[in-house]
Image (cartoon, coloured by chain):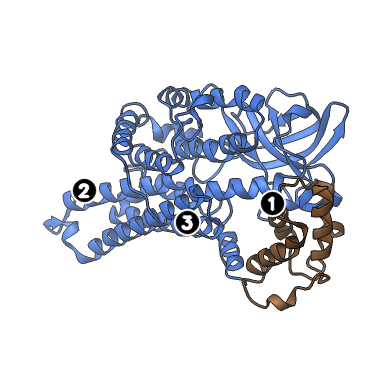
Chain colours: A blue, B brown
Amino acid sequence: MEFGWSAEDLAFAESVTAFAKKELVDDIARRDRAGEFPRELWRACGRFGIQGLPVPKEFGGRGLTALSTAHAMEALSAACPDAGFLFALSAQMWIVEMPITRVGSEEQKRRLLPGLCDGTLVGALAMSEPGSGSDAFSLQTRAEAVDGGYRLTGTKTFVSEGPVADVFVIFATIDPSLGLSGITPFLVERDRPGLHVGEPVPKMGLRTSPMSEISFSDCRIPAENRLGREGRGAQLFNDTMEWARSCILALAVGAMRRQLDASVKYAQERKQFGVAIGTYQSVQRRLVEMKVLLEGARMALYRAIWAKQEGKDAGSAAAIAKLVISEAWVQSGLHAVQVRGGYGYTESYGAERDLRDAVGSLLFAGTVDMQQNLIARALGL
Amino acid sequence: MDDAAVVPTVKAFIVEKFLFGADAGKVAPDTPLISGGIIDSLGVIELVTFLEQTFGITVEAREAGKTHLDTLAAIAALVKQKRG
């Protein structure tokens, strides 16, 4: 394993930090309460080049490696305490742009990637269904072959950015009797007749990344909207989830860094019994554990991305990263709340929002329980 | 890679990937891989990816099942047919 940050990576991370502090930090508590997706900030990020970080330059991106992209996203998250918005940006990169870049046709890439990169478009992935969550491949959504294309029927749930997305990557079966070999990915535009987008679903955290159900009733799409070959959806989904598990939680590492810095500062400034609370070993222990959790999470993150980027068998490393980082983020968030005492439980410092946001990471892109299953499978169990 | 090398190449992949390097003697040309529980549905997807990348063939969705992938002998026949 080898990854070091180039002078260019470090300089870019600095510019990302400056951009985030200038453009992305206002009004977050209100947006969180309202569950509001900040479309104008999305466009600002597009103009800066965030969404296109890992996308090849020829399709409107910056063409960074996955490691360099994650390094930039860690910096962005360390400066911007809106994990919902960061999640939306990261999800689009790894579960929408990545599969299009990998298996999309030249026409699909030229049609969609420039808009996804510059913030004109919002993309979402739809896999889970009311009856298939962790058992994702038991999906029921049908893609029946019809003259010139396919007719989609079914319902997708837990679709992050569903309420605001312009284009969806969806997975359906062309023939249930084929099992996993029938699962096929498709691109569906929001304005396609027969596509219905549900109301935003109220949720615990990541509220600025709105979620909804979407459904298809006699939704016809042309054959050129199929993403890759028929029956290759399971492969593409597994690969996409490996990218997601490896890379998305760069935002968590950035958030943990921000939490730690702010918590240390608070412990140095807050006085009780006439001294700074950071002089008490019980508070120090919390801060030390936050530091240890942060460093462990960072190692797991970049280890997994390195393996995936180098084309190695990264399934286990990705699952370990997802498991380690999400649990570390939640624990770090609890410490951040407790260091602040009663103030941590209020909205005053944003610590309670950070904690609510962190809980989502135990669930998205595969629950921690499923990551344990994947690791057990890699052990031959 | 000639046709004779297909069976040992696929067998080595299966032993490494699904038997974790142990008990290579368990896999004979007629050993049922899918119906015998050695390869599960996710494993079929991995096997298809391996066959396509290793032998430069395309396995269609309707071929990715027990009929063509349940034994080493069936897999070798599929690869031979695809390579013409």
Q: Residue furthest left?
A: A274
Q: Amino acid at mark 3?
A: Ala
Residue that mark 2 sits on: A265
Alpha carbons under labels 2 and 3: distance apart: 28 Å
Task: Name the residue located 59 percent from the left edge and 31 percent from the top edge.
Answer: A123
- Badge 2 and badge 3 in a common chain: yes
- Quadrant containing the N terminus of chain A is bottom left
* Residue A52: percent from left, percent from top: 48, 30
* Residue B15: percent from left, percent from top: 67, 69
Task: Name the residue located 71 percent from the left edge and 51 percent from the top edge.
Answer: B55
Residue that mark 3 sits on: A321
Q: Is residue B71 visible?
A: no
Q: Helix, strand, or loop for circle 1?
A: helix
A306 is higher (above) or lower (below) than A159: below
Alpha carbons under labels 1 and 2: distance apart: 51 Å
- Give the image quarter of residue A228: top right
Q: Chain of mark 3?
A: A
Q: Chain of mark 1?
A: B
Q: Between tags 3 and 1, which lies in front?
A: 1
Q: Between tags 2 and 3, which lies in front?
A: 3
Q: Amino acid at mark 1?
A: Thr
* Residue A235: percent from left, percent from top: 67, 48
Q: Is residue A270 left or right of residue A240?
A: left
Q: Amino acid at mark 2?
A: Lys
Q: Helix, strand, or loop for circle 3?
A: helix
Residue that mark 1 sits on: B49
* Residue A143: percent from left, percent from top: 81, 38
Task: Name the residue located 43 percent from the left edge and 41 percent from the top edge.
Answer: A83
Task: Name the residue located 74 percent from the left edge and 56 percent from the top edge.
Answer: B2
